[in-house]
Image (tube, rainbow, N blue to C red):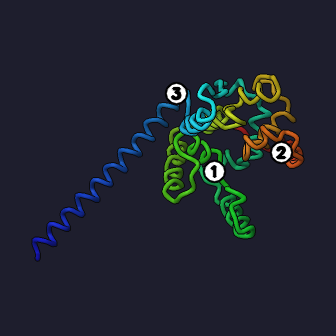
Amino acid sequence: MKRLFARIGKAFAYAVGAIAAVFVLVQAWFLGHVVYWKHFDPGTTSFMERRLEALRAKNPKAALKHQWADYDRISAHLKRAVVAAEDAKFIDHEGFDWEGIQRAIERNQQRGKVVAGGSTISQQLAKNLFLSGERSVVRKGQEALITLMLEAVLSKRRILELYLNVAEWGEGVFGAEAAARHYFGASAANLAPAQAARLAAMLPRPRFYDRNRGSQYLATYTERILARMPGAQLP
């Protein structure tokens, strides 16, 4: 009996060790990519690949609209609009806005469903770069770990630059440059304040607002963002 328990204990220890080793290797893979993207721009992301796959299921010739724009070639108006709309404390936090998360939890409890997220720009970037849109404890845990990696390795300026270039802005539209050209026929560098505010207002539901550009809520939310933009702090 003692030998049996010893064998079970040894097998359990091996199993735990193997799981721990796989976990470390997976995190090292994520970290390696984050370090690489400190100096090099990603050509695509996990979320972009999933969207392209979905589009090609309907049209095998479908392609994404995406063109990289360096930080200095993106309008400061758009940067301020996105920070004002998505993460007002972006400059100050280390990846997580705990007050925002608490407010989101309270709103969701009041409504009895998920109506607010509370995710920071860093968290959204982590999801866009690596993960799927599924909601699960494991996925959120991995998102948190990647967020910590992003904040530890990258500057706030680089995080915002990456986010603005990989965010979804419509059906097959990714990044500020493609979004500016898709909606306004302009470059990301030349966006006016009202145009920037409108793009930021679209971020929670980009594909929906691409199809419903006359939405009254979108117009109202755009005005609210426009009013908050002067107070937004940029890296």
Tell me the element at label 1.
Answer: loop
Q: Tell us which disc is closer to us: 3 or 1.
A: 3
> Relative to residue 112, is residue 60 depicted above or below?
above
Which amino acid type is marked by label 2?
Ile
Q: Tell us which disc is closer to us: 3 or 2.
A: 2
Tell me the element at label 3.
Answer: loop
Circle 1 is placed at which residue position?
93
**3 and 1 marks in contact (CB < 8 Å):** no
Q: Is residue 62 left or right of residue 190?
A: left
Circle 2 is placed at which residue position?
225
* Disc nearer the start of the sequence (3/1): 3
Which amino acid type is marked by label 3?
His
Which amino acid type is marked by label 1?
His
Q: Which x, y percent locates residue 222?
A: 85, 43
- Residue at 32% of width from left, 54% of height from top? 19
Report the quarter where the C terminus lies.
top right
CA neighbours of label 1 inside 10 A, class few (<14), some (14 to 19), many (20+): some
- Quadrant in which residue 156 is drawn: top right
- Quadrant in which residue 102 is drawn: bottom right
**2 and 1 marks in contact (CB < 8 Å):** no
Circle 3 is placed at which residue position?
39
Residue 81 visible in this rendered orientation of the protein: no
**3 and 2 marks in contact (CB < 8 Å):** no
Q: Tell us which disc is closer to us: 2 or 1.
A: 2
* Disc nearer the start of the sequence (3/2): 3
CA neighbours of label 3 inside 10 A, class few (<14), some (14 to 19), many (20+): few
Q: Which x, y percent locates residue 163?
A: 64, 37
CA neighbours of label 2 inside 10 A, class few (<14), some (14 to 19), many (20+): many
How far apart marks 3 and 2 lie (CA) works out to 32 Å
Tell me the element at label 2.
Answer: helix
